[in-house]
Image (spheres, rainbow, N blue to C red):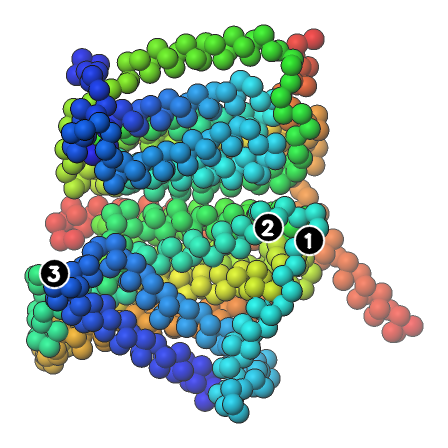
Amino acid sequence: MGLILLFLIPAAVFTGMAVALVGVIGVAIPWVASHPWGAWAMDPWFQALIKLGLLILLVVMPIASLLTWMERKQSAMMQDRIGPNRAGILGWRGWGIPHFIADAVKMIMKEDFVPAKANRFLFTLAPLMAIIPVFVTFAIVPFGSTVCPDKILQVITDTNQCTNGIGLQTAKMDVGLIFYFAIASLAVYGTTLAGWASYNKWSLLGGLRASSQMMSYEVTMGMAVLGAFMVFGTLEPQAMVYAQGPNPINWGIVKQPLGAILFFTAAMAETKRTPFDIPEGESEVIGYFVEYSGMRFGIFFLAEFIEVVFLSAIMATVFFGGWQVPFLYSDGFHLFGHALQMPHIVVVILQTTAWGMKVIFFCWFQLMVRWTMPRFRPDQLMNLGWKRLLPISIANILITAGVVLAFQAAGSR
Amino acid sequence: MIPIHWFLELAAVLFVVGSLGVILRRNALIMLMGIELQLNAANLTLVAFSRAYHDAHAQAFAFIVIAVAAAEAAVGLAILVGIFRNRRSVNVDELTIMKH
Amino acid sequence: MLWQSVQPMGRVTAQLATGDQGMQWSGPQIWWWIIAVFTVGGAISTVTRRNNIAAVMSLVATFFGLAAMYAMLSAHFLAALQVLVYAGAIMTLFVFVIMVLNRDEAEPWAWSGIFTKIVGVFALVYLVTKVGYHLFGVAAAHPETPPAEFGTVAQVGEVLFTDYLFVFEAVSVLLLIAVVAAVVVARQRGGGGTDDDDASADITTTPAVGHSTGHEDHHS
């Protein structure tokens, strides 16, 4: 019961959000743009801004907030406790969901404390350096296919053929996932600066551990997706999703199982959550944000959860078909020769919802891992990263390259 | 349209700033950063010419410069850590043991 | 061949599309100036800061400005690489080393060797004026917008893996040597790198000893 609830509530929230997201981007904005006074709505900068803003406001922040609740409820379930159930809004306790609002209020109300000898500028900069890159990276995540605003109620076979289609992705750039790695590598500064600027030995220790861990696992993370780059022949997430297609046999997890596992492991190490939470080490080291209180700490906390959401989104996009629903083509379901035709807008909403379901599933999976695994020792962490994951990922690249070449030579890629 | 020589002049300014850092500072870390600035100025020149001639060869060159800069930074910082361990200083004026 | 086709232009304004009356900047040009001031400011801040971490953060800002410059030059792949390698990897390494050393500089400028430094600065100024004289007013051979595939991963990669394959491989070997060299140079001497094994041995043996003694006490 509880487990179902844990998945169903975020899923229900997300379905509503998906309708709103597609509705605003695919219907409302083209409607504004169709009027003579609304031509500004088709401006590419405005479009990009509205897409990223809506994605963050309607999807990322609600899921990240719900994750704080999911995490507590999940851990309570796994440890045979009841978990949060006290806070309520006008008597509505909703299985403890109002707790995240209570948490936010608490953090905002707390004293904003800066240690006397801390470097004030860098101390303030560190939380921003932790959270801004995570928001920016969402620009490359495709959360749906292309909306054709002219024929939302018709059945269409190819979304690429419609004029003025609106792609459900903020920025379609050629460098694709390299942009993600570039921006995500900046998150290291957040942790290291926090550790350094606090003027505290424990936080410095935590910051050192964080930077060494993140640098080590970034290598494996990049190497693990190289296989997927080769298989799909592109670096661009939207193109990768199109290359995977609606048939699950072509998804990244089937073609790159090893790469998927390696990427997930390395990226979990990047988020610095429990099997890899040495920089934080809540029970003994008390990591890089010891000196942070109130909303400054809250930003680190939130950044961690948004990283969880982002990792789930990338996992879904690269290895689990992104927004593709199994056997749902752009004109409806096709399975074993049977076809069920659907209007365009229904297909798009289904796809965006499916993307959200996949994201929520991987968030939940990370929570499971977090409450199942014990923490690594620092030397075990480094051994795992450099002596196991990295050689395996290089072997994965070599094998994938060989197989791709063989298929190309056979002429049936 | 941005004239291409603006980029070249910016690269020259960056190169000067980086060189001044290398020449005038005594802290080996800042000197390494000055070298990085110089390399970046050279890279900017390469990319500007690449754009001016619509030729990607210069970009491949800049790519290789970035890789070599990474190697240089790794070895340079390792040497710095080694020096600091023995001498407790990264001030280049104090590293005169080979002179005497 | 390259220098033959580079011809100094008389005036800057001659190239401006809207430059009918002197200096009238278009949108991208205003952006260029903002980013250029940002970049040069970061660079100057880098070489003048006394605090090492502040210098590193200034340099990161400079690299961001440079990445924006690359993007303005349609070199998007290099812009991403600039952020990935420089800001993400090299400067993180700097921060890491600075945190290990963790010292502020007492005396950033010194009079020792001032003569050599003055000579160096003069040589630099001479060199830059000489080169700058040739660079000023250089016009692009193809000022029009480059084709869509210019500066993409595919194009740079193709050049890299065909014309410069040997160089690419040599650089990869160089990087490998650098990694090994960095480990060898920075490693603690004398310990032989068995610290981890000792620590793990301590952790595994100590509870075992405690357990056995407790067991004997119980029996006796």
CA–CA distance in space, label 2 to label 3: 46 Å
Measured as percent of width and height from the top left, residue C173 is found at 40, 30
Q: Report whether A19 appears left or right of A330.
A: right
Q: What residue lies at 29% left-to-right and 50% top-to-bottom?
A: A176
Measured as percent of width and height from the top left, residue A251 is found at 26, 63
Q: Report whether A346 appears left or right of A132.
A: left
Residue sitting nearer the eye, B56 or A345: A345
Chain under callout 1: A
Q: What residue lies at 49% left-to-right and 71% top-to-bottom?
A: A367
Sequence order check, earlier mark of 1 and 3: 1
CA–CA distance in space, label 1 to label 3: 54 Å
For label 1, the residue is A115
User: What is the number of the mark on residue A123?
Assistant: 2
- Marks 2/1 in contact by CB < 8 Å: the verdict is yes
Sequence order check, earlier mark of 2 and 1: 1
Q: What residue lies at 51% left-to-right and 86% top-to-bottom?
A: A89
Confirm whether residue B54 shows in the render: no
For label 3, the residue is A164
Measured as percent of width and height from the top left, residue A70 is found at 49, 77
**Which amino acid, mark 3?**
Asn
Chain under callout 2: A
**Which amino acid, mark 2?**
Phe
Confirm whether residue A199 shows in the render: yes
Q: Is residue A153 above or below residue A411?
A: below
**Which amino acid, mark 1?**
Pro
Q: Is disc 2 placed on a helix, strand or loop?
A: helix
Q: Report whether C196 appears left or right of C79.
A: right
Q: Is residue C163 above or below residue A412?
A: above
CA–CA distance in space, label 2 to label 1: 9 Å
